[in-house]
């Protein structure tokens, strides 16, 4: 966000709208008492897949100001590296900072993956650290692509997990 004075308010507005307008009606989300959350983008074959649309709309890109081009380039790269075929995409996994390192995100992800397994659905995600890669590998994800985001951005790791049954 270009203006540090409004950054938190702008992010809260964008994230709130994304959850309300896209994830709740068309995707999936889980939480543990609001302390940890997962948000999943549906596959195209899912009833909400088409309605969900692209990752960001024009208003979201515009909110990044001078970083708009870098955000578009990063989203473009992720889009090219995502696996082909039907899969749920883990868009967000987050834990309240005061509750981190207590296993909440792992428990929540395990819950979501059990649901994917029961429905014989594949999962995919991207992450930005080798530590996260190990976390996801311990849950059956396999690294399928690696790159560096444009404009000096962080590393990007794309991972896939077939259903376990």
Image (spheres, grey):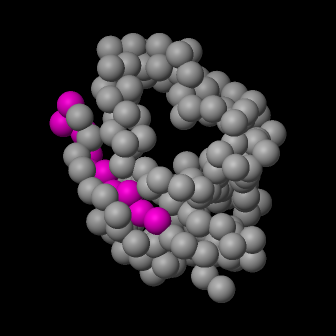
Q: Is residue 7 magenta?
A: no
Give the answer, above or below, for where 103 lies relative to 34: below
Measured as percent of width and height from the top left, residue 153 is found at: 25, 39
Give the answer, above or below, for where 120 lies relative to 98: below
| Residue that extends furthest to the bottom in the rendered view of this protein | 165
Q: Please tell me which residue is depicted at 39% across the width and 13% down the height of the picture.
A: 65
Measured as percent of width and height from the top left, residue 22 is found at: 71, 35
Give 142 or 12, whichever is nearer the viewer.
142
Span highlighted in magenta in the image: 151-160
Give 137 or 120, whichever is nearer the viewer.
120
Residue 6 in sight in this render = no
Give 41 or 46, whichever is nearer the viewer.
46
Q: Please tell me which residue is depicted at 29% across the width and 65% down the height of the picture.
A: 130
Give the answer, above or below, for where 126 lies relative to 142: above
Give the answer, above or below, for where 97 lies relative to 53: below
- State which quadrant residue 68 falls in: top left
Measured as percent of width and height from the top left, residue 35 is found at: 67, 58
Main SS class of the magenta portion in the image: strand
In this rendering, position of residue 144 left or right of residue 29:
left
In this rendering, position of residue 67 left or right of residue 64:
left
In this rendering, position of residue 32 left or right of residue 62:
right
- State which quadrant residue 159 falls in: bottom left
Q: How many marks?
A: 0
């Amino acid at each position: 966000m270009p203006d540090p004075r409004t950054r938190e308010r702008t992010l809260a507005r964008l994230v709130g709208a994304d959850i309300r307008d896209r994830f709740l009606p068309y995707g999936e989300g889980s939480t543990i008492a609001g302390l940890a959350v997962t948000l999943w983008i549906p596959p195209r074959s899912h009833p909400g897949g088409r309605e969900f649309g692209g990752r960001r709309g024009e208003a979201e890109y515009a909110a990044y100001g001078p970083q708009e081009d870098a955000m578009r380039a990063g989203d473009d790269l992720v889009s090219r590296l995502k696996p082909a075929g039907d899969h749920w995409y883990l868009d967000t996994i987050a834990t309240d900072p005061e509750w981190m390192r207590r296993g909440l995100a792992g428990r929540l992800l395990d819950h979501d993956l059990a649901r994917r397994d029961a429905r014989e659905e594949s999962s995919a995600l991207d992450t930005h650290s080798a530590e996260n890669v190990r976390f996801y590998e311990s849950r059956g994800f396999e690294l399928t692509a690696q790159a560096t985001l444009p404009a000096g951005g962080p590393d990007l790791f794309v991972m896939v997990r077939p259903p376990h049954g």
